[in-house]
Amino acid sequence: MAGPIPAEATGVLPAEALAQAVAPPCLLVLFGASGDLTRRKLVPALYRLFREKLLPAEFSLLGVSRTSFSDEAFRGRLGEELREHAPSGFDPGLWGEFSGRLFYHPADVDDPGSMQALAKRIHDLCRERAIPGNLLFYAAVAPRFYSTVVRRIGEAAEALLGQAIHMVTG
């Protein structure tokens, strides 16, 4: 359930943002996770929300792309980028806490088997992180890949997750 904005966020956010509640637990599945948009815009924005205590305690991000990374390598790469592009807003201790919510899964949207493995990873992460099936899919990919990504997400979600999904393209 959503909660009130923490007192620490006052003075940091505009008044209209303070009227909003913290979002419920969520797994953000981010396609195009090894790309520039993720490194330079999306993760820094999520880190700021975390720093301002505006992400739910059960929030996690699962990055997906064809590049082969481990969870640790993905976190390390994003941390280096964040340090470089937001040095004044980077806190190593806070990053350590935030980055523990970041996960990675290599997948090729042209391979249906890859999407089945992704669906299993989503299911497992939701169980491990106490996320009650609230999924947000974000496609930070070139427009020519939108239809394939959306189709594969739909197939995997319908066949293996059995729940409704929401899709945002960037």
Image (cartoon, rainbow, N blue to C red):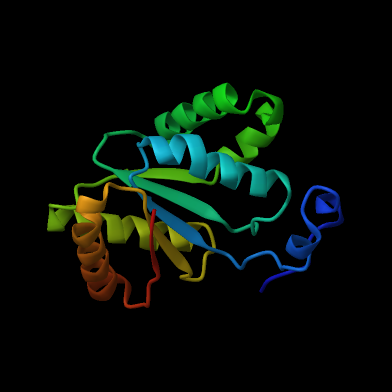
- Tell me: residue 75, above or below residue 163: above
Depth order, front residue of 3/17:
17
Q: Is residue 110 left or right of residue 145?
A: left
Residue 4 horizontal side relative to residue 62, left or right: right
Q: Position of residue 7 (x, y in %)?
A: 86, 56
Q: Is residue 53 left or right of residue 166?
A: right
Locate residue 115, reporting x and y percent. 22, 57
* Count of numbered tags: 0
User: Residue at position x 37%, y 63% from top?
Assistant: 123
Image point (30%, 47%), residue name: 141
- Closer to the camera, 19 or 127? 19
In this rendering, is residue 75 above or below 59?
above
- Residue 50: x and y in percent read 66, 47
**What residue is rendered at 21% in x and 69% in y?**
155
Q: Quadrant of the N terminus?
A: bottom right
Q: Residue at x 52, y 57 (%)?
A: 129
Q: Quadrant for residue 159, please give it.
A: bottom left
> As rendered, which of 75 and 32 lies closer to the eye?
32
- Report x, y in % for residue 143: 26, 52
Along the line of sight, the residue nearer the viewer: 39 or 98: 39
Q: Looking at the image, is 97 positioned above or below residue 85? A: below
Is 146 displayed left or right of 64 in the figure? left
Up-down relation of residue 60 to residue 32 (above or below): below
